[in-house]
Image (tube, rainbow, N blue to C red):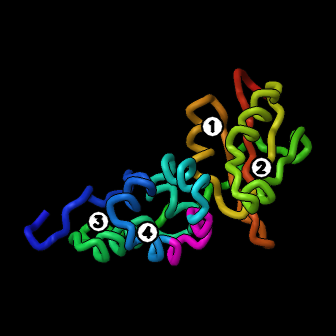
């Protein structure tokens, strides 16, 4: 960091949103402008849960913006040099071989929970825990739930998300302990 740069943590793809906003509270409105779904961070419950586990990498995914653009904008506004390499974006995932709408055994619309300021992660993992091998759980959210997808992956679930025309994201989860076919 050069002498003219402000002190604080280096803004990188792996910084958690809470750490970023604790160090640079003036960036909250800029982050919300880039990722409007983060307007919910004004709710103290969501700020203390979602913001603590969400990285800028995940925030960019949620907002559908290029990671390099988000990191460089925040770095510039925080007085850090905007030298994060720009990216071309990640290609959209094509439908995985394991997916079949007929295998969806549960659907959960998390929109009402989020609208009421509640983090639905616990409810989602309760439902995921009831899946039998080869069954698919469908989660409907107003944004791609990148932190939840990452946590589910750590717990042995595969996932696939698609953005619906109406604006919602449908994310499908499957637990695979063997060949589900």
Q: Which of these two is toward me, 51 or 103? A: 51
The disc label shown at residue 152, or none: 1
In the picture provided, is 133 more to the left or to the right than 28?
right
Q: Secondary structure at mark 3?
A: loop
Magenta stretch bounds = 32-41
Q: Residue at x 71, y 27 (%)?
A: 176
Position above or below: 173 against 168: above
Query: Label 3, label 4: how many angstroms apart (C-alpha)?
Result: 13 Å
Circle 2 residues within 10 Å: few <14, some 14–19, many ≥20: many
Residue 6: x and y in percent read: 19, 68
Q: Secondary structure at mark 2?
A: strand
Queried whether the magenta region covers residue 165, the answer comes back as no
Circle 3 residues within 10 Å: few <14, some 14–19, many ≥20: some
Given contact means CB atoms under 8 Å apart, are the residues at marks 4 and 2 in contact? no
**Which quadrant, please, contains the N terminus?**
bottom left
Residue 145: x and y in percent read: 63, 53
Q: Which of these two is toward me, 179 or 118? A: 118
Asked whether residue 47 is in view, the answer is yes
Query: Label 2, label 3: how many angstroms apart (C-alpha)?
Result: 33 Å
> For residue 38, what is the image quadrant?
bottom right
Circle 4 residues within 10 Å: few <14, some 14–19, many ≥20: few
Residue 69: x and y in percent read: 40, 73
Query: Label 4, label 1: how many angstroms apart (C-alpha)?
Result: 26 Å
Return the disc, 2 or 1, that comes first in the chain's sequence. Answer: 2
Mark 2 highlights which residue?
139
The residue at the far top in this view is 178
Return the disc, 3 or 1, that comes first in the chain's sequence. Answer: 3
């Amino acid at each position: 960091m050069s002498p003219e740069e402000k002190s604080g943590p280096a803004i990188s793809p792996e910084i958690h949103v809470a750490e970023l906003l604790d160090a640079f509270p003036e960036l909250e409105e800029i982050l919300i402008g880039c990722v409007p779904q983060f307007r919910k961070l004004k709710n103290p419950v969501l700020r203390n849960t979602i913001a603590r586990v969400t990285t800028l990498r995940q925030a960019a995914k949620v907002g559908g913006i290029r990671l390099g653009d988000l990191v460089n904008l925040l770095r510039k506004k925080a007085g850090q040099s905007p030298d994060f390499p720009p990216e071309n974006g990640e290609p959209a995932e094509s439908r995985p071989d394991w997916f079949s709408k007929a295998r969806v055994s549960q659907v959960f619309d998390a929109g009402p929970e989020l609208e009421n300021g509640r983090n639905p992660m616990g409810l989602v993992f309760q439902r995921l825990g009831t899946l039998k091998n080869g069954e698919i759980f469908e989660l409907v959210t107003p944004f791609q739930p990148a932190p939840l997808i990452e946590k589910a992956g750590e717990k042995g679930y595969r996932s696939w998300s698609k953005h619906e025309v109406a604006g919602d994201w449908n994310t499908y989860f499957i637990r695979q302990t063997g060949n589900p076919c």
